[in-house]
Image: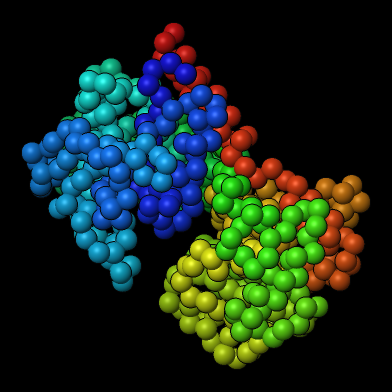
Amino acid sequence: MTGTGVLAVTPELYPLIKTGGLADVTGALPGALAGEGVTVTTLLPGYPEVLRALQGVRVDHQYADLFGGAAHLLSGLAAGLELFVLDAPHLYERDGGPYGDARGIDWSDNAFRFAALSRVGADLGLGLLPDYRPAVLHAHDWPAGLTAAYLQYSGRPRPATVMTVHNLAFQGRFDRRLLPALGLPPAAFSVDGVEYYGGVGYLKAGLRLSDRITTVSPTYAAEICTPEGGMGLDGLLRGRGDRLTGILNGIDVQTWDPARDPLIAAPYGRKKPSARAANKAELQRMMGLDSEPGAMLFGVVSRLTWQKGLDLLLAALPALLAEGAQLAVLGSGDAPLQAGFTAAASAHPGRVACLLGYHEAAAHQVQAGADALLVPSRFEPCGLTQLCALRYGAVPVVARVGGLADTVIDASPMAVAAGAATGVQFAPVNVPMLEHAIRRAAALYRDKATWRRLQANGMAADVSWTGPARLYADLFRGLIAERAA
């Protein structure tokens, strides 16, 4: 690849700071792209967790005043990744998460916190440092959306730009009166710039002004171009349809490997899956479920939100229990859903269990011990939990949306007969169809030979970053060639 590679601009990166799948992608993609000859350096906010992890720190640039305070651009290594880190204590040195406090309330200065990230990303793209100038700038989600705007309105030669949407529901819309404070010219406030329903739209800016747009599955790329799935941006996305590509996510198959996973009770592989029984027994013990080897055990590893369809699962719980099945839920999210699953566990001891919060070891144990993994999302850009489930032999039961539709092959009679099925899909996404999917899964589970085939097919699926990384590398190279022509 010509130039100095790719600069990724992101608000999250696993294992340093994570709220969802975005961090998993930005943490895994640089290593996968290295295999394609693409060098990635990542720009990340200087959250306390990030600064503590950074090694070999060098101060590359100083800002006397970056949206209200002094800041330093640092570089170094963390988790084996080459990083730039924006050390701006007035913006990032606080307890809580990347976007809000411990109560889940957004930081009041998020407009400036992520404008700063975008501004520094643009500065790097424009040659801030004499020994670094990326060929491609890759922005992730709304917190990096203004990067393309700062580049566009600089009036200077710039790198190629790619905007990746991980979840269109989060858009970053702020008051139009902030435009001068953000350092953007009046001309930027237009339908062809950052204006979005009378405000400043960070994601909208990235979608409108980047050279290419990607999202995290082909089906989701089609869905967001419709009024039903576009969340107010479908017209823009349809207009830029020739610039939009859906590239599936992968997972880190070194971290998620049941044959070598130190976080599960007993390792196992596709050829000898019998040790899954020990993992199921451990999951039942860990979650306080009845020790019943023959009872079908459904697992959930998810944020407990409306998007994820977990309210539908609460409503469908009687159908699940009527099959003699068990349910183990790991996650946190909306208070009513947390309360609902906690109440269900109290009402059905030994049959339903709920562990609130996210625990990495517990997530691995659910994947290794559950017979099936439920993902009833109303919309799902890609989803990673079903990819982990395939790898671990937990048969996915998923809504037919987004990346779930692209990664799970429904166990229809024809697919089962052809030996291709890997899970159960259902649509439309409502309670009756989820109940039907649960009953279908239970019937398949009782057919042991068919169930083992579903597990084997899933465990044989390529859920790695190898294929996606090749597509990203091709996209980047094509962009560079276009700009050189």
x%, y% of residue 315? Answer: 62, 78
Q: Tag count in the figure?
A: 0
Quadrant assignment, res 333: bottom left
Q: Coloured how?
A: rainbow
Q: Residue at x 54, y 66 (%)?
A: 361
What x and y, as percent, mark residue 87?
A: 20, 45
Return the residue nearer the eye: 457 or 432. 457
- Quadrant housing residue 282: bottom right
Q: Is residue 27 above or below residue 442?
A: above
Q: Is residue 265 left or right of residue 9?
A: right
Q: Is residue 3 left or right of residue 428?
A: left
Please say if 444 is above or below 109.
Answer: below
Q: Residue at x 13, y 36 (%)?
A: 62
Residue 186 in the image: above or below residue 311: above
- Considering every residue shown, the one lying at the far top of the view is 485
Q: Can residue 143 be seen?
A: no
- Is the residue 146 above or below the residue 97 in the image? above
Name the spot of residue 467 as percent of width and height, x first. 63, 34
Identify the residue at the far left of this view. Answer: 64
Which residue is depicted at the point 77% across and 53% down?
270
- Could you tell whether 279 is left or right of 414 in the image? left
Which one is nearer the viewer's eye here, 51 or 98?
A: 51
Residue 151 rendering spot, x and y as whole percentages: 27, 28
Q: Quadrant of the C terminus?
A: top left
Nearer the observer, 354 or 460: 460
Q: Is residue 90 visible?
A: yes
> Going by the image, does 354 lie left or right of 99?
right
Q: Residue at x 55, y 29 (%)?
A: 35
